[in-house]
């Protein structure tokens, strides 16, 4: 895997760069998750990311986002925070949509949220076929019951929604 550690040490300056990087890594490196697609369906993948892969914050005042090949491994010793777990969920959905050649794929977006009027957290929301306009939070940052499918981590005083550029 030498030469594939893109963004491992790149310092991001604001949450908009983080949003762009999460979308980019999920799209570029979705094939990192191909072995997992044979093992898990989407709810099982969510549970794996949420409950098996431990949360580990970025260093203070530093923002890093990593590719799925690293953050999907339980023994990986790098950081694995909300943006890394968002990459894992988005990449899995993108790969699943592609491999299954869905006529009506699952749609994705990212939510940047915070409690007190400023950005502090990022997580994906999914819109499933047959449920237009209904976006389900898929925040896998922490283990259940703190994070669960369909549940927001906290009451949001700040919320911005971003869609992939496709």
Image: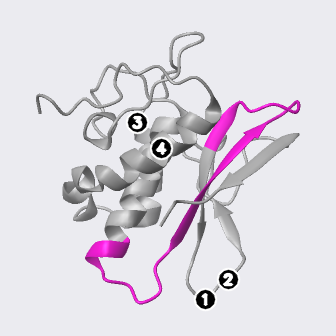
In space, the residues marked 1 and 4 are separated at their CA atoms by 26 Å
Q: Earlier in the sequence, mark 2 or mark 4?
A: 4
- Contact flag, marks 1 and 2 (Cβ < 8 Å): yes
Indicate left or right for 122 with 79 as reference.
right
Counting from the top left corner in percent of width and height, residue 57 is at 52, 20
Asked whether residue 141 is in view, the answer is no
Location of mark 2 (residue): 132
In space, the residues marked 3 and 2 are separated at their CA atoms by 31 Å
Q: Which residues are magenta?
A: 97-122
Q: Is residue 113 magenta?
A: yes
Q: Nearer the viewer, mark 1 or mark 4?
A: 4
- Contact flag, marks 3 and 2 (Cβ < 8 Å): no
Location of mark 3 (residue): 53
Location of mark 1 (residue): 130
Q: Nearer the viewer, mark 4 or mark 3?
A: 4
In space, the residues marked 2 and 4 are separated at their CA atoms by 24 Å
Residue 73, numbered label: none
């Amino acid at each position: 895997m030498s030469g594939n550690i893109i963004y491992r040490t790149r310092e991001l300056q604001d949450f908009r760069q983080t949003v762009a990087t999460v979308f980019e890594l999920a799209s570029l490196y979705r094939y990192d998750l191909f072995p997992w697609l044979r093992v898990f369906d989407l709810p099982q993948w969510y549970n794996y990311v949420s409950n098996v892969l431990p949360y580990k914050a970025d260093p203070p005042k530093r923002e890093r986002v990593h590719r799925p090949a690293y953050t999907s491994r339980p023994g990986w010793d790098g950081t694995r925070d909300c943006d890394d777990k968002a990459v894992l969920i988005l990449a899995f959905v993108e790969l699943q949509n592609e491999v299954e050649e869905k006529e009506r794929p699952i749609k994705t977006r990212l939510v940047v949220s915070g409690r007190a009027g400023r950005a502090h957290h990022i997580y994906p929301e999914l819109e499933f076929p047959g449920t237009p306009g209904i976006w389900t939070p898929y925040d896998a940052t922490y283990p259940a019951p703190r994070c669960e499918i369909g549940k927001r981590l906290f009451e949001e005083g700040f919320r911005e929604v971003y869609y992939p550029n496709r």
